[in-house]
Amino acid sequence: MALTASASALTLTACGAFDDAGGSGSSASPKRGDDITVGLLLPDKDTARFEKFDYPILKKEVASLTHGKGKVVYANAEASPATQSRQFRQMVDAKVDIVLVDPLDAKSIAPDVQKAKDAGIPVIAYDRLAQGPIDAYVSHDNELVGEVQGRAIIEVLGSKAATSKIVMMNGDPADPNTAKFKDGALGELQNKVQIAKEYNTDKWSPAVAKANMRKAIRAIGLNNIAAVYAANDGMAGAVIDALKESGATKIPPVTGQDANLDAVQRVVSGEQYMTVYKSFLDEATHAAEMAVYKVQGRDIRFDALTRDTVDSPTKKKIPAMLVPVVALTRDSIKDTVIADGVYSVKDICTPKYEADCAAIGLK
């Protein structure tokens, strides 16, 4: 996907100097005005939230914080690390004021982060932690995501957990969040269930997850699978398709993450047991604030947003904001995605799901 504003059309120059996060600059007298450009690099379109929520929220919030003068230059890598690297370099060459990057490959993006740093352009890692000299990180508590997923499996299996065989469908090993999700899940699952098969999923591909689920069904036996830990909703849908195509008349509990609309509908119908709801509004809003405050030198406000710290393999004590997460089940749809305005009842309860919605009082 091409940048939404061409490099030649950008006339803003990159800031030559930015205060460190721990600086003492006054938030009352910004060093830059409102005419700033934020570069936004998102990883793929398979994860519905990026195009539908993250980008529009960030764009709106940057405009709001800059009295309509600031803009977001956006590019989506469409699951290609090489494309994302090229897009990153284009943004540096175009002299955007700051880059928000959700890295497809945390390690391979590091040289691009360094190039931005050399050009005096700060980089904030968004949703996934990038390697290299990044200035800050905003995401959710990713180990907690895995804990919530794992705990849901243990709770639904109840007294049968110890004798139950489950399949673990982890995310892309190149994604640093994958290890966090897995660690959190294993903290709940290990020694409490039998992990019969475990797979990594290249690029979070639903097609890869589906193929691996078919292998698991052949190896374990359809009726012997008590639950499936699927790290996100795209893979959860693929896992459920594989189970149905193999003849399952009752789908075992399947986890997910991201609260995609189709996943919420599967939760309503009972096909998917749960998904992890992460407030896109909070994450994107805070990321926009961090980006604007960083460029404008509003250190006090920036510091107030980054009271956590995280470590990457290449940098320690990175200023961070970690947004909480919650489990979304049939019982909590009203209190999560509907209460936050992510979806309306009309969005969820299409004709196909009307009866299921009525059964849980969603109307």
Image (tube, grey):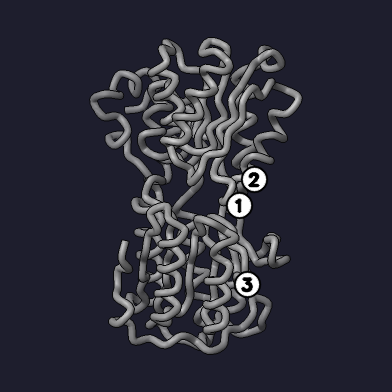
Q: Is residue 292 above or below residue 363?
A: below
- x then y, percent, for residue 142: 61, 47
Badge 1: residue crowd in 10 Å (few <14, some 14–19, many ≥20): many
Q: CA distance from mark 2 to mark 3?
A: 21 Å
Secondary-structure class at tag 1: helix
The amino acid type found where label 3 is placed reads Pro
The amino acid type found where label 2 is placed reads Ala
Q: How many marks?
A: 3
Question: Between residues 307 and 183, which one lies in front from this camera angle?
Answer: 183
| Residue in the image at 43% along x and 37% along y | 206
Quarter occupied by residue 269: top left
| Residue in the image at 42% along x and 73% along y | 38
Q: Is residue 322 above or below residue 148?
A: below
The residue labelled by disc 3 is 133
The residue labelled by disc 2 is 179
- Disc assigned to residue 45: none
The amino acid type found where label 1 is placed reads Pro
**Which tag, 3 or 1, sits closer to the chain's start?**
3
The residue labelled by disc 1 is 176
Q: CA distance from mark 1 to mark 2?
A: 6 Å
Labelled pair 1, 2 in contact (Cβ < 8 Å) = yes
Question: Between residues 296 and 214, which one lies in front from this camera angle?
Answer: 214
- x then y, percent, for residue 301: 58, 73
Residue 312 visible, this angle? yes
Residue 26 as seen in the image, left or right of residue 11: right
Q: CA distance from mark 3 to mark 1?
A: 16 Å
